[in-house]
Amino acid sequence: MAIDKINGTAFDNIAKLDGVEKASIAKFNSQEVPSATPAIVTADLIAHWDFNDSNFWSSGTTFTDLANSNTGSLNGGLSVTTGTPNYINTDGVNDYAVCDLPNDYGQQQTIEQWIQYSGQQFSMVRGYRTNCSTANAGYWPNITSSGAIRYTIGGVSNYTLTSNNNVTTNIWYCLTWVLNGNNIKLYKNGSQIASSTISTTRHPVCATDCKLSIGMIIENNGSISGSSSRARSQALSEIRIYDNDLTAAQVLSNYNARKSRYGH
């Protein structure tokens, strides 16, 4: 039972008790005080797709990035499946969603996605700086056909970190990739599952446009060929990209803030 009154004063009206904020009180007379609701981290958020937010998508084939107001599009007949949650499910043939991405991210980066694995290999996000003369100048979090979680980053040669902590079909997962300089960490449902240090030289960030695509690989020149050989099958509900490396506590907070939507 919650505390209703203390010394005749309504508890809800008490801002402080002996100089301690209400939100910081874990117990009072052995009675639990509700903890604060986990919050989504918004600092340094440069891309935010959420098909469950009417400010992002309400109908049709266009959407608006919640972080930077760029307009994106659903292509190849791709539509939003509505329910709990809303999501897109690309067919691995010609479906894709694409939107511009700001140019300001660099050596620190976090990519967080709520996805459902289909049993097929796919690249979940692939962002390329357009007009880069060097191939593999992008990044692509992906999952293998066996369900292993990977992060591949382009450079003089590609570097891939693979986790043996696999995903299975028909379950929603929160997957997070955190890059800090040459260090990569992978998280599944708020818990770290792998980490490594990049041993190869990465391609420098190009000072031109960048795009974020789901379902179709972006070519080195920033174009989308539309070829089925470049398409990937995947179900996705949310994406967040940060121009910063989130801490383990922040990764967990984001997961906890959304997990009930996905039946966790």
Image (cartoon, rainbow, N blue to C red):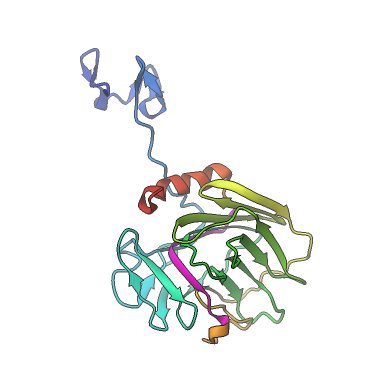
What is the magenta segment's predominant secondary structure? strand
Residue depicted at x 41% and y 77% = 73
In front here: 232 or 184?
232
Total marks placed: 0
Q: Quadrant of residue 72?
A: bottom left
Position above or below: 58 against 107? below
Q: Is residue 63 left or right of residue 239?
A: left
Q: Position of residue 144 (x, y in %)?
A: 61, 66
Q: Residue furthest top?
A: 7
Magenta region includes residue 234: yes
The answer to whether residue 168 is visible is yes
Q: Which residues are magenta?
A: 230-245
Q: Quadrant of residue 54?
A: bottom left
Magenta region includes residue 120: no
Residue depicted at x 49% and y 78% = 92
In front here: 74 or 10?
74
Residue depicted at x 38% and y 36% = 36
Q: Position of residue 8 (x, y in %)?
A: 20, 14
Q: Position of residue 18 (x, y in %)?
A: 38, 16
In front here: 80 or 44?
80
Quarter the N terminus occupies: top left
In front here: 192 or 98?
192
The answer to whether residue 223 is visible is no
Q: Position of residue 169 (x, y in %)?
A: 48, 61
Residue depicted at x 75% and y 59% = 198
Q: Is residue 64 left or right of residue 123?
A: left
Position above or below: 93 against 110? below
